[in-house]
Image (cartoon, rainbow, N blue to C red):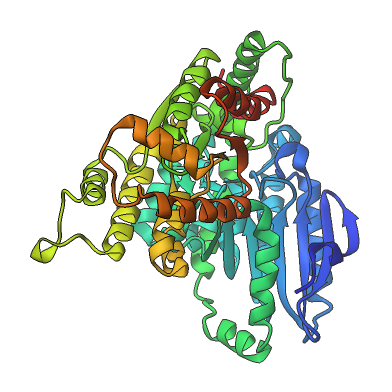
Amino acid sequence: MEELSELKEIDRSHGLILSEINLNETSFATVITISRPEVKNALDLQTMRGLAEYVDKITLKPSAHRTAVVLHGAGDSFISGGDLKALHHLRDTSIAREMSSLMRQSLEKLRDLSGLFVVAAEGPIIGGGAEVFIAGDYRIISSAARLRFAQSSLGLSTGWGGGRRLAQLVGKSKALALLLEGETLSATECQRLGLAHQLISKPDHLLAETFQWLSQQSQHPQALYGIKRMLRDDDHQEVDQLEAELFPSLWSSEDHWRAIDERRARKTTHISERSKTQSTPQHNDDLSISSKADLSAADDTPPRGLFVVYEGIDGAGTTTQAERTVEWFNQQGRAAYLTQEPSRGIIGTLTRRALSGEMLGHGHRALPAESIALLFAADRADHWHNEIEPRLERGEDVICDRYLYSSLAYQGLELPESWVRSLNSLFPQPDILLYVEVTPKVAAQRRDKRGLAADRYEVDELQVQIAQRYSTICREFDAHWVNGDLSIDEVTTACIDILSPLLEMGHHIQS
């Protein structure tokens, strides 16, 4: 597999980059990059026209060696819909008809290629961006991505073929709810619903893993072409015609532009209020459908909260530091929530009882390691979907004492690590992971001072092995390391030094 540095740029224009990459000795992929990071890769009319030109360039020069076309967005966004600032003066039905035609034809031409049309997305996937995403034959999403069909909040329908494709993927009933209610879906929910085929846990590995997957599929190109051709669905002309007529009429309607003007007013108010609370005002009049500030202004919901995880062996002091982090966040004017794993939910309570030996299995015997691992995974699913994710969506910061990395370190010691990883593969990565590294000897002394009964894993010999595993795992997941052998206050200072830049840069700053 070639490195990303070996992407060969062919052309660049209108906020687009056309490149190629060799997948193996006989196959290559063409890569289209939407490169308008200043507006979260929102599309203006020139970019839509440029995309149509690039697609024609690809389709007019077919190659038996091109096994895929990959579409992705530059930076930390995919496509945040239409660039409403650039499109604000283009209110005619004829313009809407042109935009709809350009995007519908471009996406259909990509889908008509013999090779795969692959979409790789991270960050906001909003409005028209969601339509582009679900048009892909194979859709790869990063754990940091969020998808939302925001059209109805602007008095619009889908206009690029998204309505019909969404119904095909999730069914008419669920499609109706998503289009009318504009629910924001996490990457995990997208995969569960079938909107995404593959979830990449590390956003910065998205393209590399996409190319790696394609290199494997390109070993047998004729099978790939045949399978795609076999599954092609051409029975959609009537639905597409209805959408093609509906979108332009809604685009030029007073209701749509009233919604846009209301959004502008809310956004101006949002920026003004935020400027009053920050020493350096941030001027951001980007009106793309889905920049983070725009999302909050559009539907009166706050920016998504920050998810912080502390990890470390027993006695490292992660609980104390998590508590202190919540206090510090609150002092900065942020709404922070403390939680931990195992959680305080019903499954987490069972897990704690199993760890302490209070809950026994058949024959009054200790539960096997497999049961413990499954309990942790079940608790984590409940914890994430019903406690962590809802709070993040409401704009709260969540500080979590232990998360999935503890399962890899602890249960991975007793069981095949590949199996433990598979149990935890769908859970999103945090925004920041802090590993409080402490020597096992110091940790043991701290545990002794607590005077509590040791649980299943709190044995000195095991803790040495677990510390070694933690070290390897946290390096893999790019954790921030903190010297846990220092005093409590010194460790707190080190943690705040790591977290402060995120807040100073305005990461998820709440107005």
x, y percent for residue 333 = 52, 14
The answer to whether residue 509 of the structure is visible from this angle is no
Name the side, left or right, on which 129 lies relative to 351: right
Q: Residue at x 16, y 48 (%)?
A: 358
Position of the C terminus by quadrant: top right
Q: Is 27 situated above or below 471?
A: below
In the image, residue 257 sits, relative to residue 281, either above or below, namely: below
How many marks overall? 0
Which residue is the extreme one toward the left? 363
Q: Quadrant of residue 290?
A: top right
Which quarter of the picture shows residue 506?
top right
Q: Is residue 95 left or right of residue 373?
A: right
Most foreground residue, 493 or 395: 493
Towards the viewer: 363 or 142? 363
If the image is split into quadrants, where does the N terminus sit?
Answer: bottom right
Q: Position of residue 79 (x, y in %)?
A: 66, 48
Task: Residue lying at the far top in this picture: please name it.
Answer: 276
The quarter holding residue 411 reads bottom left
Eyeballing the image, is 26 above or below 429? below
* x 62%, y 39%: residue: 481
Quick one: 298 or 46, which is closer to the camera?
Answer: 298
Q: Residue at x 65, y 65 (%)?
A: 209
Relative side of 179 to 344, left or right: right
Image coords of residue 175 (percent x, y) = 41, 54
Q: x%, y% of residue 55?
A: 77, 66
Instruction: Between residue 190 and residue 326, name the one nearer to us.
Output: 326
Q: Residue at x 44, y 65 (%)?
A: 422
Residue 60 can be seen, yes or no: yes
**Placement of 169 over or under 225, stated as above or below:** above
